[in-house]
Amino acid sequence: MTTTVSSPPRDHRPPTTTSSDGSREYDPRKDPKIIGIAVIVFGTLIIALAGVGSTPVMSGDGSGTVFPFQDINNESREEVALALEVNRSSLRPGGAVLFNATYENGTPASSATLSVGGSEYSFDDSGRATVTFEGGGSYTATIRKENTESVRYVADGTILSVERYKIPLAVSANATNVTAGDAVRFAVRRADTDAPVTATISVAGRTLQTDQRGHAVARIERAGHFEAVARRDPTAAQRYVSDSVSVSAERQQVRLAIAMNRSAPRPGETVRLTLFRTDTGATIDGNLTVGNRSLRTVDGAVTVSYDRAGQYQVRGTTTNSDSIAFEPVEQTLRVYRYAAPVSLSANETTVESGESVRFTAVRSDTGEPLPGQLTVGNRTYWLDQHGEATVEFTQSGTVTATATRANTSTHRFPADELTVTVKDTEYRLGGVEAPESVNRNASATIAVDVSNRGSDMGAASVTYRFDGATVDTETVVLRAGQRATVEFAVPTETPAGTYDQTLTVRGDAVSASIEIRAGDASA
């Protein structure tokens, strides 16, 4: 443990006082009353040092005083508390701690003494000292200062914990399942760096020292199960975490295996599982645990069936004989879902902005309607019980529609998709030509101009409504920028009166009123 900053001790002198008239500085050392009190205090101090007085503050473990001073009740002395602060209380070997010593008024206690780890250190003019801790352990740091005639200094302290670097060991063996009498070569290394380590290995009642490569060879003289433990004594800065490896010296080991007659069974299908020895390939009777069912084989086999798709763990075991120990086998039985691909269709795949498309999803294997989800662009819709959903398209462009359905316990539904093209068409009405009045039953027409302001060719459907009722609809095909006139016959057979007429096209509408006079043009 080293200190990087130190300074010679300096006495702390409390502030002096001034007389009430402010003419000169008051010195208590020249006051006869103070001198008399000091004589009494000195006698009391002699008695206290002889063993009469308060008990020093002891450390928690009883090893000695944490703050080594006698608590002498001398009211004539000013009591000044020392304070010790550290920048950290937990560290690693080689780390440094900055100690800061102050008086109770916050000024640096540069003349105090720091005791830690059996060594004493001085503080610099700022009341600071830096100590480096090379070894691990728990340290008690105390700060003290010799009392003066007029001041008693109250010590302070703190506990520091220096944790050794933890070095995990890793031990391995060239064989962990051997026959009694076989030799096993062990290797010890650092688990963090993989570097070889000299250590001891205890196994089967023997302790061996590894060589410089971390190797040691032990002969296992008897059958049984052993733990080979690698250990190394700690150093001042490091402690080693032991590791172990299991070694079994036993009878001949034979692995078991399980064969399945189906590689991808489906729900409801039967699967034959056969237990056999890997050394000879012969079937062997034993126990097979499939999922939560335990079955006894007959002629080495069992038959199972599951009505749900999923993964089922299979474990096979059998009883050991006098000369052979059979290793259990574990593997997974996977039951796969039936595939029922989605088939998505639409009543239209090329539409104009503002038009709707009806989508229909069915199972491709059976043609049954398939409820689920329909994703169109960044919007999601539900496919109803008939597998249908209607979507209105308001923006031109190419949009992908995808139909999906969540998997069930027996089926999976691969998604299907199609593309819808939305034309860039924009229709506007203008230039309405219609009479303001007309005799009843007279011949009259209303005409309107319709234009396509979009960039694609489209079909504009113009609807004529008279008094709120639809009379007729005319559709004209317009290229980009093209204009056309649409004409409708006015139903003048309507009783006399004033009526509203409305002409609409997708995205636009115009209106005009007309008076039907009582005069009958057919009379």
Image (spheres, helix red, strand yellow):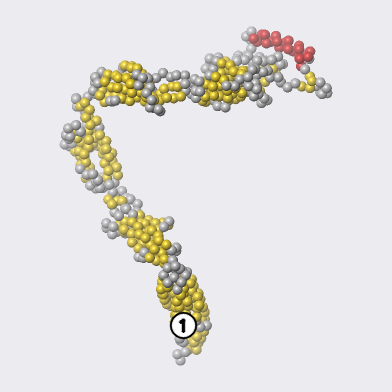
x 42%, y 24%: residue? 167
Write down the quadrant of residue 109 in the picture. top right
Residue 242: image location, x then y, percent: 38, 23
Q: Viewed as shown, does residue 471 lie left or right of 71?
A: left
Q: Name the residue beneath numbered marker 1.
A: 445
Is residue 146 visible to the viewer in this orientation of the structure?
Answer: yes
Disc 1 secondary structure class: strand
x 50%, y 75%: residue? 430
Q: Viewed as shown, does residue 163 lie left or right of 125?
A: left
Q: Viewed as shown, does residue 254 lie left or right of 45?
A: left
Q: Nearer the viewer, residue 84 or 367?
A: 84
Q: Nearer the viewer, residue 8 or 104?
A: 8
Q: Nearer the viewer, residue 462 or 363?
A: 462
Mark 1 crowdedness (10 Å alpha carbons): few <14, some 14-19, many ≥20: few
Q: Residue furthest bottom?
A: 523
Is residue 60 visible to the viewer in this orientation of the structure?
Answer: no
x 54%, y 22%: residue? 132
x 44%, y 67%: residue? 455
Residue 144: image location, x then y, percent: 62, 18
Total count of labels: 1
Residue 143: image location, x then y, percent: 61, 19
Amino acid type at image mark 1: Thr
Image position of 67 with respect to 319: above or below:
above
Q: Nearer the viewer, residue 309 or 504?
A: 504
Residue 157: image location, x then y, percent: 59, 21
Q: Viewed as shown, does residue 347 lie left or right of 329?
A: right
